[in-house]
Image: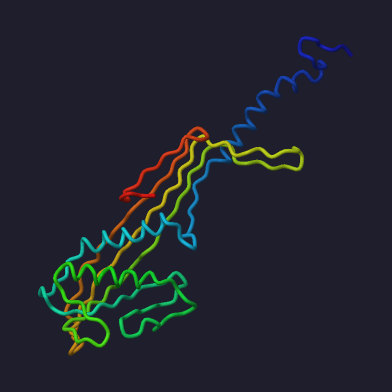
Amino acid sequence: MAIDGAKGCFPARRQACEGLPGRWVSSLALMLLAGCALTQEVSRTPRSAIEQLLLSHAVERALENLAVPLPEGESVRVEVSGLQTDRAHLHLDDQDESFGVIDSPSWDLGFVRDAMAGRLGELGYRVRRRGEEATYLVRVMVHAMGTNQGKTFFGIPAIQSVIIPFALPQLTLYAEQDQLAHVRLHLELFEMSTGRFVRSTPWVTGSTYHNQYTVFFFFTFRTTDLPEAP
């Protein structure tokens, strides 16, 4: 059987050889598509500095939008209640900070309580501590406090194979990592002497974000609404 020198293939296999470039292109396209994905992640523990700043500033922004329908100058006591990530209910006040603690949940609600006390002080209220009499009880009901993370990646992921004796690194054409912190809460107000319910406030929200981008392998930049982000 003669060999076609121009093509470098036997005539019977010329059609298969001519199809190789198309197969390589198809394989490369499939690898690129396999590297394009959007995933969601839960908050990492322990939290990074960025995540802590996102949450603390989200709390501050929620409290900035909060109106307290009580006479200015009244004495108040602050409590906070919300759901923990371990799905155990936790209620904190100044008299017993360990009430309801199950498996050492995080102290996020303690931060909300102290931030609320500071905000009430700015508004002209007198915040009472343990053993001190107060006219009103301000209970902060935290609906949500946490971060959402998302990733977008387009390129070729890192490849390791027993056939190829070396590993191929990840080739990033475009990558995006988003972090969004969100806080939602409202207040419930009571008279301390009688326990009478006064009223509740509409819920308010606070959000912050920090996004990182990579373009063409190593060009990186970020966008955020955090002041002086690290």
**Horizontal placement of 120 versus 41: left or right?**
left
Q: Position of residue 54 (x, y in %)?
A: 36, 56
Vertically, is 213 above or below 110? above
Vertically, is 90 above or below 47? below
Q: Position of residue 221 (x, y in %)?
A: 42, 39
**Horizontal placement of 194 versus 91: left or right?**
left
* Quadrant housing residue 184: bottom left
Q: Position of residue 91 (x, y in %)?
A: 35, 79
Which residue in the rendered view is the most extreme toward the top? 6
- Name the residue at 76% across, 43% down: 162
- Name the residue at 71% across, 24% down: 20
Which residue in the rendered view is the most extreme toward the bottom? 194
Question: Total label count?
Answer: 0
* Quadrant housing residue 24: top right
**Horizontal placement of 58 versus 48: left or right?**
left
Vertically, is 74 above or below 118? below
* Quadrant housing residue 35: top right
- Name the residue at 19% across, 87% down: 133
Quadrant of the frame with the N terminus: top right
- Name the residue at 49% across, 63% down: 45
